[in-house]
Image (cartoon, rainbow, N blue to C red):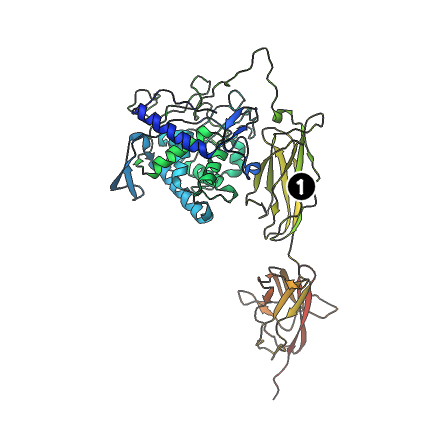
Amino acid sequence: MAAHFGRLRKGAATTAVAAAAVAALSASQAPGVTTDDLGRQAAGAQPSADASTGGAGGGATGDSPYYTDLPPLKSPNPSPSASPTTGTPVSVGEAEAGIPATVLDAYKKAEAELRASKPGCNLPWQLLAAIGKVESGQARGGRVDASGTTYSPILGPKLDGNGFALIADTDNGAYDGDPAYDRAIGPMQFIPSTWEWAGRDGNGDGKKDPNNVYDAALAAGHYLCRFDRDLSVQSQMNAAILNYNNSTAYLNTVLSWLEYYRKGTHEVPDGTGTLPSHSSGNDSGANPSPSAPATSTPSAPSTPSTPSAPSTSKPGTPKPGSGGSTSPSPPSSPPSSSTPTPPTPTQTVDHLEDANTGKLTATAGGAFDAKVAVRAESKANKAVAKVRVRFTIIGDTDATFSGGESVATVVTGSTGTATAPALVAGEKTGDFTVRATVVGRVLGGLDYTATVVPRPADTLTRTSDTALTCVPGGEFADQVEVKATYKGAVAGKVAATATLIKSTDDVTENDKGPYFKDADGKVIRTLTDLTTDADGVLKLPKLYADDTAGTFLLRINTAGGAALTVELTVAAAAS
């Protein structure tokens, strides 16, 4: 997807020279050529180690078009004044360099959230601002309501293969209103299938709305921070940007705005930002460019000076043609009208077959030995290469793939096989599902059941040999403490239960003798949801005795079959 810059803006000659220098520098950091599902060449980085799991080919945006305007040649000048919204220092620059207040706030909140949840990523808010500028002109110049939702949906062109990637509908039109093909949606231009797993709730309203700038900015931040990337490392930042939209021209444009915003920017009122005028697509397509706010620029599209009321329609009913980052351009080398266009690899897939996936079982906190593997096949049962397969973890589980995500996209190889990243078990035990589906096709997927079993222990011993005694109606001076091991090694985080039983032959709960107390001080004789600590040690709460004298038994059991019976004595004190 080659960018074109149209007519030069003010400072044309010097701006063009500066742009060329930036482009040359950025291009030198990301050599190589990749191909998309249509077989078209797209400049980008050489496939990195994470390319197999990062939505290769279409990225977050499905390689949708973007704005190619470069920042002003003159950097903004620092100003001692403070923002009326955030109270932070701002800079004064040209009008097009300003960021609408709500949009700017969304980027900074996303940076703060990522600084807490993924501190090693080092995400700068200026990177989100650069991508937001390129993808939607900062939400069409900040045409958002107080909650950050755009007054009308921002939609990209149909991804119908006419100049762009071919992505058949994946959301039944729920987000983009198109039941035939996908469109990029929202201020950060996510394709629906990516938003389905990458979406976040950035403004705390309980919804994940791609047309809300807080939600979209936070989702973009998490998307860029995948695979434990450190964005303070330039090569990793480049890889993240290219994973968002696989184009060297896109990388160059984003890096230009990033550098500009790092030197300072200024806040402008919502709805007064300027919309870029040049796009990587042309303006002759059927899909109209997004509306721009009223400005003094004569060439800006004419719109009402007052934004319309926020749309109350649900995600499934956006207004067709109500916005988008650009219009589609025709392919650079259109096929002859007499030559039929060959189907893409994705279009030839008929079904998925299992590719010798092993038994998916792991101990809590451990890794699964087997990986989910599937093979994409045509109707004639032939392997299909270069097809994107999405693996999704479904169910009540905290298991993840090795990169820490619950969704991974892998491209099939020459044998048609796609293997999911390694599964890592969390602390929740039980079954969950891993589902494999073909991206861009409405086909039945394959479901795999994975099981997380509790950590085991095969031996329990007391950490003290002190006799446990008490007088009737009193309390035991010592608390019961045991240590769990498995095959001689410490068994930490092992589930356990403790019950005061009637006898060795009758392990039902006793109704008299020693007892524990719950949080309300009530008598209980069975404890559940116990867990040994990292050293395998389990210390039970204090024991009390009723007025019944005699010898009683406490039974402790753990996952894995370990059991220990502890003797308790209740007797009157010797005179």
Labels in figure, total: 1
The answer to whether residue 108 is above or below residue 512 is above
Amino acid on which the number 1 mark rests in the picture: Tyr
Quarter-of-image position of residue 449: top right
Q: Residue furthest top?
A: 338
Estimate the x, y position of residue 291 in percent, counting from the top left.
38, 24
Relative side of 104 to 404, left or right: left
Rendered residue at 69%/41% (across/down): 357
Estimate the x, y position of residue 329 in percent, counting from the top left.
47, 19
Rendered residue at 59%/17% (across/down): 341
Quarter-of-image position of residue 556: bottom right
Given residues 556 and 232, the one toward you in this image is 232
**Can you see residue 310?**
no
The answer to whether residue 398 is above or below residue 348 is below
Estimate the x, y position of residue 484 in percent, counting from the top left.
64, 65
The answer to whether residue 459 is above or below residue 340 is below
Q: State the residue position of label 1.
A: 448
Estimate the x, y position of residue 58 in percent, counting from the top left.
53, 30
Given residues 546 and 94, the one toward you in this image is 94
The secondary element bearing badge 1 is classed as: strand
Q: Quadrant of the C terminus?
A: bottom right
